[in-house]
Image (cartoon, helix red, strand yellow):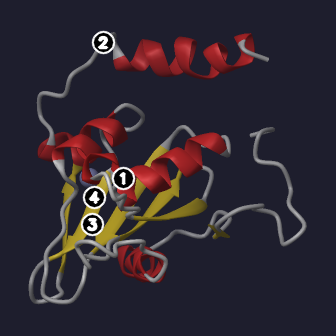
Amino acid sequence: MSAGAKGMKGPAGGGARRGRTPVSKESLMDEAMKARDASYSPYSRFAVGAALLAASGRVHRGCNVENASFGLTCCAERTALFKAVSEGDLDFVAVAVTARTGHGAPPCGACRQVLAEFSPDMMVYWRDTRGRILEKKLSALLPDLFDFMDHGKKRSEGGRAGREDNR
Ligand SMILES: [Zn+2]
């Protein structure tokens, strides 16, 4: 928690903060839609936004960031995840993802793996082509994730402790 330094704009520093107030899937999806406004997608024109709810109560927004070298493009979910981790959050409750109207946008395989590194049991919300919010546990979307070592052990011993070692 100490890494979540108090910023000048409010207690959260970066990203919206809901404190301990429960965040509904609808409001998390609203955050994802706001995140989508920042999408850098001049090549595909397929804007995507994600909002990642951390166990701390912070909501981290992310958008897809494309590149002229297409393979270097980063999805909205990973943008949000990397922002969150860089700001001290390692445990997550849920992520909402949205693309343009009429397009469902569950996380791609790469994002499922990256999200599962931290919280394989988090909820994932996305919208179907009619705009309805669908939901599934990440572990259901990625049942056999690549796991270098035991997740519980890694998160309690190697995760935060590893960061301490690097200071
Ligand atoms: Zn992705």
The local crowd at label 2, few if under 14, some if 14 to 19, many if 20 or more residues have their Cα within 10 Å, is few
Instruction: Return the residue found at the far right.
Output: 8
Marks 4 & 1, CB-CB < 8 Å contact:
no
Which residue is identified by label 2? 148
Residue at point 37%, 77% (across, down):
29
Residue kind at label 3, given as amino acid type: Tyr
As measured in the structure, the alpha-carbon distance from the residue carrying label 3 to the one carrying label 1 is 19 Å
Taking 10 as reference, is 142 left or right? left
Marks 2 & 1, CB-CB < 8 Å contact:
no
Marks 3 & 1, CB-CB < 8 Å contact:
no
Residue kind at label 2, given as amino acid type: Phe
Q: Secondary structure at mark 1?
A: loop
The local crowd at label 3, few if under 14, some if 14 to 19, many if 20 or more residues have their Cα within 10 Å, is many
As measured in the structure, the alpha-carbon distance from the residue carrying label 4 to the one carrying label 1 is 18 Å
Which residue is identified by label 1? 74
- Say if 102 sits above or below 141 in the image: below
Any part of residue 66 in sight? yes
**Residue 149 placement (x, y as % from top left):** 33, 10
**Residue 11 placement (x, y as % from top left):** 82, 64
Residue kind at label 1, given as amino acid type: Cys
Q: Nearer the viewer, mark 3 or mark 2?
A: 2
125 or 163: nearer the eye?
Answer: 163
Which residue is identified by label 4? 124
Q: Indicate the quadrant where residue 6 lies.
A: bottom right
Which residue is identified by label 3? 125
Taking 92 as reference, is 17 left or right? right
Residue at point 76%, 47% (across, down):
4
68 or 161: nearer the eye?
Answer: 68
* Disc nearer the start of the sequence (2/1): 1
Indicate the quadrant containing the C terminus: top left, top right, bottom left or bottom right.
top right
